[in-house]
Amino acid sequence: MRSFIYYSRTAPTAGNYIKEDLQASGRIDIAIHSVIASFFLSHKIRTDTTLHMIFAGPPTPSRHLEIKPKTEGKTGEDKIYLSKKNVSDILKKMLYKYREGEKYEVFPGYWIEKMGFLELVDTLLDQGKKVYMLDNEGEDIRKADIKDDAVFILGDHKGLPQKEWKRLKQKCIPVSIGKRMYFASQTIAVVNNELDRREDGE
């Protein structure tokens, strides 16, 4: 099992803030591409991945969206059909269904709650997970000792705020996918590929 934390300073925290123009909607398009990179293989949905998304944009930050799609059972009851075309609608519905004071399962495998970025990281660390921060100056991921059930942190086009960055460096393990800067979704794909190759014995 592997997990990603995608942090966005601009992604909206209410469904009605997601408009037809996704780039103008707090760059929710980056979040959508990150969902696709996390879960979609050719003709298959990953079952070994959890995606945590922290949206810190307007109007009421922060929201924690946790996604681990269920693939077994009857569509509409035990699972929902996840396609590349409906990711935006799913995120919008999750935001609309937020309930104050609780972690609410909007669909099977899709939860939303009010939680901040550092609080989420601390929660996962308290659960005994090893948390890795994607950092150009970190150890090459091809050489790094990546533990089972690892968690990887990455930011949106604006990156992580400096205050959070400094605190994370004291708690998390920095790893790098190379000197060049990639999109968040591309970074997820590279990390997934590296872990897949390790599992396949390559």
Image (tube, rainbow, N blue to C red):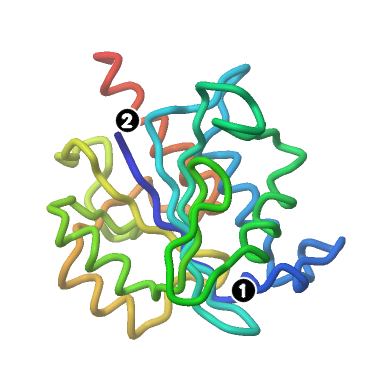
> What residue is shown at x 35% (from left), y 31% (from top)?
194
Which of the labelled discs sits on residue 143, or is there none?
none
Q: 30 above or below 33?
A: below
- Which callout, 1 or 2, points at the residue further toward the start of the chain? 1
Answer few, some or many: residues within 10 Å of disc 2's Cα (few below 14, many 20 plus, some between 14 and 19).
Answer: many
Q: Which residue is mark 2?
A: 195
Answer few, some or many: residues within 10 Å of disc 1's Cα (few below 14, many 20 plus, some between 14 and 19).
Answer: many
The N terminus, quarter of image: top left
* Location of residue 174 in the rendering, given as x and y in whole percent from the top left corner: 24, 58
Q: Is residue 142 left or right of residue 12?
A: left
Outermost residue toward the top?
201
Q: 40 above or below 115?
A: above
> What residue is shown at x 48% (from left), y 70% (from top)?
159
Q: 78 above or below 97?
A: above
* Location of residue 153 in the rendering, given as x and y in whole percent from the top left corner: 36, 58
Give the amino acid at mark 1.
Answer: Thr
The C terminus, quarter of image: top left
Which of the labelled discs sits on residue 13, or is there none?
1
Give the amino acid at mark 2.
Answer: Leu
